[in-house]
Amino acid sequence: MLRTKIAGIGYYVPEKVVTNHDLAKVMDTTDEWIQERTGIVERRYGKKHKETTTSMAARASEVAIKRAGISKDEIDFIIFATLSPDYYFPGCGVLLQRELGITNTAAGALDIRNQCSGFVYGLSVADQFIRTGMYKNILLVGSEMHSMGLDFSTRGRNVTVIFGDGAGAMVLQPTQEDKGVLATSLHSDGTYAEKLAFINPGAHGGYHAAHMDEAQDFGYSDAEYGEMFINEHMIENGQIFPYMEGQFVFKMAVQKFPEVILETLEKAGLKKEDIDMLIPHQANLRISQFVQRRMGLRDDQVWNNIQKFGNTTAASVPIALCEAYEAGAVKDGDIVCLAAFGSGFTWAGAVIRW
Ligand code: UT7
């Protein structure tokens, strides 16, 4: 039976370290508050005008391609997961193709917009393409340059302190061996779309206002259609930044993580006792610790790096997995479980035999 194996993995984080103390200089927050509520000590920010979501993805991809032992022109499909694309359109998939100098136009490029679960969704999509024999070398990346789109005033502190920049990548190939992706599970529930969202600029024109907890006056004038996408009123009122109802999201996350892990293990014919390494999306250290307790896992069976990188959304799972691999914490034959939950809401799981 054809399966999807991880032939190469890589990650990249920018050099610039931003500590909680640095953030406390620009907004009303403290190192104590951030560490106690999230576990985060510091995060990385990309170099403005020098690095982007795409350029960081390229650095991570170069490592993954090298480890896979292929040339970049052998890549026949690119899957790019991000919520912080360089452009509104076109997507980062084609920008990455250009950045890597891939001249093979037979390679397709697909962008995935599933926020925190984007990478695990992407892995499931890649798995289908590989198992049907359609592609032989899929480059899957998750990359985020959050620092370009956060509210650094006190108004945005509940969101801004959490996020960091970075990228992770994998090269995926077919294998006849009994290893690689054993099962994936994908879920969504759009009921709570606005609980964690980055709404403007967008083509909604206020249509979904009834779903927002706080009534938002978007300042539209019926005659001025062009201004419905983005206008000065939105900018003045901070409606151009991510919004999160943190406690609501937290409660959903601690419910959905264990559910999707158990579901995906069952599909793979495994039990929670079979997990060698759990790589949870790095949403909040408190969420990961809750999930660890629910799964009955030891500290050395769960990889957390949110303390130093913050929440890198679509990049967090591949960065954490790559770090665990480089540290020798993931070995041949290990059962590795990936799980993510986030905006949408969407959540997903994957079980891999390394
Ligand atoms: O990755 C995608 C999925 N995302 C998540 O899973 C995130 C889930 N949620 C969380 O991680 C937490 O809800 C947060 C870390 C975002 C927030 O923690 P919280 O304990 O839920 O805080 P809160 O939003 O309920 O706010 C509690 C208080 C408020 O003050 P008052 O109204 O009680 O006076 C906030 O204004 O903490 C205040 N606060 C802050 N204080 C200092 C909010 N952010 C900050 C801050 N520094 N950065």
Image: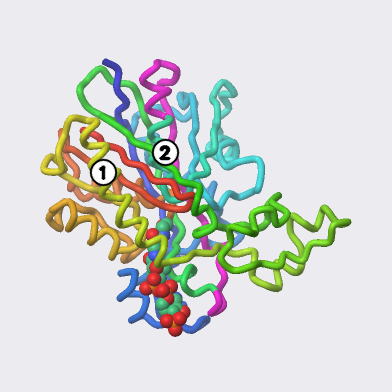
94, above or below 205, in the image: above
In this view, the residue in front, 333 or 245, is 245
* Residue labelled 2 has its Cβ within 8 Å of some atom of ligand 1: no
Question: Residue drawn at (36%, 43%), measured in percent from left and top?
Answer: 10
Quadrant for residue 260, please give it. top left
Asked if 181 appears above or below 3 in the picture, the reply is below
Residue at image point 38% right, 50% down: 341
Secondary structure state at the residue bearing disc 1: helix
Mark carried by residue 151: none
Q: Magenta stretch containing residue 28, yes or no?
A: no
- Residue at image point 38% right, 41% down: 120
Label of residue 261 in the image: 1
| 93, 61: nearer the viewer | 93
Which is more foreground, mark 1 or mark 2?
Answer: 1
In the image as oriented, which residue stretches furthest toward the right? Answer: 223
Local SS, label 2: helix
Mark 1 vs 2, N-terminal side: 2
Tell me if residue 138 is in the magenta stretch: yes
Residue 304: image quadrant is bottom left
**Distance CA(mark 1)–CA(mark 2):** 14 Å
Label 2 crowd (10 A; few <14 / some 14-19 / many >=20)? many
The residues colored magenta run 126-155
Q: Is residue 177 left or right of residue 11?
A: left
Q: Which residue is mark 2?
A: 121
Q: Amino acid at mark 2?
A: Tyr
User: Taking 57 as reference, is 135 above or below it?
Assistant: above
If the picture is divided into quarters, which one holds ligand 1? bottom left
Picture coordinates of residue 50, whole percent (x, y): 58, 57
Give the residue displayed 51% in from the left and 40% down from the top: 112
**CB under 8 Å between discs 1 and 2:** no
Provide residue 114's location: percent of width, then percent of height.
48, 45
